[in-house]
Each structure stands twice: as structure tokens, then as C-alpha cells.
Image (cartoon, rainbow, N blue to C red):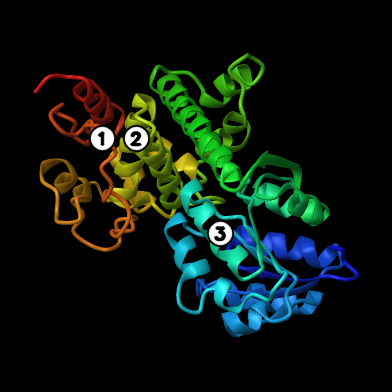
Amino acid sequence: MISPQETRVTLIGLDVVGAAMANNLVEAGYALCVFDDQDLPSTPDVARELELAGAEWAQDMAEACQDAQVIIVAPHDPVDVEELFMGDDGILEFAEEGAYLLNMSTCSPRLSYEIYACAAVGDQTMLDAPITGGDTAAARGELGIYVGGDESAFHEVEALLQVLGKRVLYMGASGQGQLAKICNQVALAGSLVGAMESLALAKLAGMDPAKLLEGIRLSDASSWTLYDLAPKSIKRDYSSGFFMSRFIQEIELALELADSLELTLPGMEATYQLLDLLCTVGGGELGLQALSLLYEEEEVCAAYGLDWSKAEDLYDGEDEDGCGCDDEDCGHDHHHHHDHDHGHEHPDQGQGFRPGPGPAGFGGIMGSFFSPN
């Protein structure tokens, strides 16, 4: 029986969301062990706070998994999930027989099922349980959680998941939680672009964006993006509760899945190009609301670390990795982004797509986006 009094839980990954999840588990009375595999600058401070609250600190994966009845993987980049579970010194190597493994990161449904099958060989039960909601929802214990895997296992850990989220939904067999999360991100990407472009249009036409936002929130166009991200954009608060560099990986998963199903998603193709551009010029570590910087003047972009010169090669000639970046600080993972071929011509290929910051400049981008050569 999974309960605070009887269950030892390990949580792996202590970014801002993972740290909030760990804190909620400690407050709920679970015996918690934490391990950070990402070497984040904030880790020492987070570790001290959690240890003071009663959590234990593991020095390596083996120690983290020892005697753990439930192992939770907090959000990681999708490219890291396979190695984290199935690589050398990975979770499957050290997890105890009978342990429940909860992957709250996003990955492909196919990979999720592969991990599920490998875990079963070791008598471990794997559930995919990716989250939505970001750092604010994590701190409040109000995440959305999509769960895939054995239904009986879901009911065993459901009470624990309800400590972390207020919308805990069982979606079906292994991989279905990941499928739901990927579809969720497609919808989010569409609303994100719509929200940022509506604010840019209002601002350039002379309307106070905050006033527009007040009106849209009362209409049938209202969305979480308008309540959470748009106000931050207006205040030019681009701090991240969810990194743009991680979000673009999730949109890439959606495009890859669509291609495998022979489905074209032109809206997501266009959105991917915008996200890609922002990451390339240095916005990968900013929050999703930083998409609005693509519609700002160049000096505003520079104040938040964006360098438009990095975009020149992206559209005038690609490097061997395919992204055109001159250095490793472009916001991409060069071993993952741009390596795929999801069967569609990118908008920058043969359509005259060229970057240029600022309202007038970006208007030029969008004008040429659909123009002939």
C-alpha cells in the first residue's frame, strides 16, 4: 500500500518544478530521498532546504534507488529520458524489484513503452505520468498529470500523485500519458503564438496591451496562456517556469509522431520555425512568454540576451548539425534538434524566410514567410 506512513519515495531531478514537487511530498509526510543528476547551480540551496525539511540526499543513482518503493523522475529534457532510465548506471539498473517508476518527463510514446517493457523484465512497474502546469502549479500541488500504464498500478500510486496534482487522469495503456501530453503541447503552442501575436498587433497599432488582455480574457478566446504568460510578457518578465529549449523538443516530438502517422501539421511546422528562431538567437533558457521578443525592437531583444547575428547562418546556410549555429550556446541540443526529417519542407527552405528583429523587421519576416523566392 502506497501511503506516507509506509512508503519510501525517491525523486530524481531538482529544477524549479522538481524542487517544488519534492517539497510537497515532504509536507505530505512521505519519507523522501532526493537526487539531482543535472548539476544545477541552485541544487546546493535546494538540497539544504529539503534536508532541513526532512528529506535525505543521495550522492549517486545507486544510493537514490536503494530501498525506494516509488521512484519519481521529475521533468527532464526529452533527449535525456532514455539514458536516465536505460543507460549505464540508469534507474533500471538499480531500482528494487517491485518498485513503481513514475516518469513525469515528456518523451515519445514509443520510448515510454520500451522503458515499460524493460522495467517489467526486472519486476518493476513503469508508469508514464508527464505533467502540465509549470512551476506555479507545481508549488501549489496543482499540476495536471496524464498517466499511462497498467490501470491497477495507477490506482496504487494515485493518492501520491494527487499530492502533486489536482488533475490526475488515467489515459490508458503505456505511452498514452505521453501521447496526451504531446497533444496538449500542440494546443498550447497554438495558443501561445496567438496570444503573443495579438499583443504585438495591439501594441504596434497603438492600443495598451494590458487593456486588450483584460477584454480578451472575458471573451471566448480566453486561455491559460492569456492569464499566465501574457501578463509576464507585458511586464517583460521572461524568467522561465518552463524553458523554451525544452518546449521546442516537445513540439519536435509532436512533428515526429505526426510524420509517423503520415499527418501534416502546418500550424506546428510554422510554430516550430518561430521557436527555433528564438532558441537560435539565445532565447532557449527563457520562458515561453519570451516568444513575444520576436516582435520587439532589436535593442529590447539585446537587453534580454538575444543576438540576431546568430540567426544569419540559420537561414543563409546550415552547418553540419543542420541548425546553422556558430557555437554551443544557441539554446539547442545539437544531438537532437534538427536531426530529424519529418517529411515536410521547412518554411526557410525555398520560401524566402529571413530573420529581422523589431515590429517592422519581423513584419518583413512574416511578409517573406509566405512570399515566393
Residue 270 percent across, percent down from the top left: 32, 30
Q: Nearer the viewer, residue 290 or 270?
A: 270
Q: CA distance from mark 1 to mark 2?
A: 6 Å
Q: Residues within 10 Å of mark 3 (few under 14, many from 20)?
A: some
In the rendered structure, which disc, 3 or 2, sits on the residue that comes first in sequence? 3
- At x 80% / y 50%, what residue is drawn? 155
Residue type, label 1: Gly
Q: CA distance from mark 3 to mark 2?
A: 24 Å
Q: Quadrant of the N terminus?
A: bottom right
Q: Residues within 10 Å of mark 1 (few under 14, many from 20)?
A: some
Q: CA distance from mark 3 to mark 1?
A: 29 Å
Say which residue label 1 marks: 343
Residue 201 percent across, percent down from the top left: 41, 20
Relative placement, left or right, of 262 versus 26 is: left
Say which residue label 2 marks: 259
Residue 195 percent across, percent down from the top left: 49, 27
- Quadrant housing residue 224: top right
Relative placement, left or right, of 42 versus 22 is: left
Disc 3 on helix, strand or loop?
A: helix
